[in-house]
Amino acid sequence: MKLAQTIEDVYAAETGLARQLLALSTRHVADPDVYAMGRTLSKRCDLHLGELAPYAQRYGATPREVPVTVGDSADADLLSDLRRLYPIAHEVEITWVILLQGALAIRDTELVDVLRPIQAEAQHRWQWLRTRIKDASPQVLAMG
């Protein structure tokens, strides 16, 4: 069933994003918002996957660990890190959308009920990144 593959894709994407968010918070500990939100959002990724776990089993998905390249440059500026992370978060959100659409297609109302709030939260994640990019851009570019 293709739904199993989509669940596996969500696991890989969400796991990778969690690592990236944690790395972001670690690199930018001096920025309280980025530090706190990076850690919070990373934990939320783990919670989302916990909520999805029973459905992974139900549909025969085998979640896998996918190696993720996390930037480790201690001197990377915030704007560069946010810009790099934004498309990743957006891709993760669209993967949740695809899974939600699959659940709707097979009429698994239980799964739909689990996925709707997660997908909405995934959307808020990349929107937070976009807001932080807007906030950081003038500061970084004007100092420049």
Image (cartoon, rainbow, N blue to C red):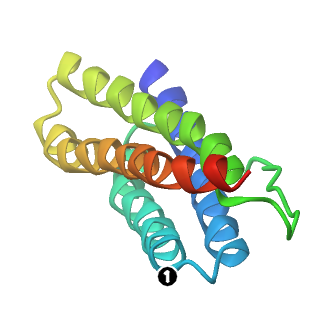
Disc 1 is placed on an element classified as helix
Measured as percent of width and height from the top left, residue 144 is found at 74, 50
Measured as percent of width and height from the top left, residue 97 is found at 33, 28
- Residue at the (58%, 60%) spot, across then down: 18
Residue situated in front as seen by the camera: 29 or 141:
141
Please identify the quarter of the rendering in which residue 49 is found.
Answer: bottom left
The 10 Å Cα crowd at callout 1, few under 14, some 14 to 19, many 20 or more, is few
Residue situated in front as seen by the camera: 66 or 16:
16
Measured as percent of width and height from the top left, residue 7 is found at 47, 37
Q: How many marks?
A: 1
- Residue at the (36%, 29%) spot, across then down: 99
Looking at the image, residue 74 sits to the left or right of residue 36; the answer is right
Looking at the image, residue 130 sits to the left or right of residue 140; the answer is left
- The residue indicated by pointer 1 is 32
Please identify the quarter of the rendering in which residue 50 is found.
Answer: bottom left
- Residue at the (68%, 52%) spot, across then down: 81
Looking at the image, residue 75 sits to the left or right of residue 110; the answer is right
Q: Do we see residue 16 in this rendering?
A: no
- Residue at the (28%, 49%) spot, across then down: 118
Measured as percent of width and height from the top left, residue 142 is found at 62, 50
Residue situated in front as seen by the camera: 24 or 3:
24
Mark 1: which amino acid? Pro
Determine whether 104 is above or below 32 in the image. above
Residue situated in front as seen by the camera: 71 or 66:
71
Determine whether 28 is above or below 4 in the image. below
Determine whether 50 is above or below 68 in the image. below
Q: Do we see residue 124 in this rendering?
A: yes
Looking at the image, residue 109 sits to the left or right of residue 57; the answer is left
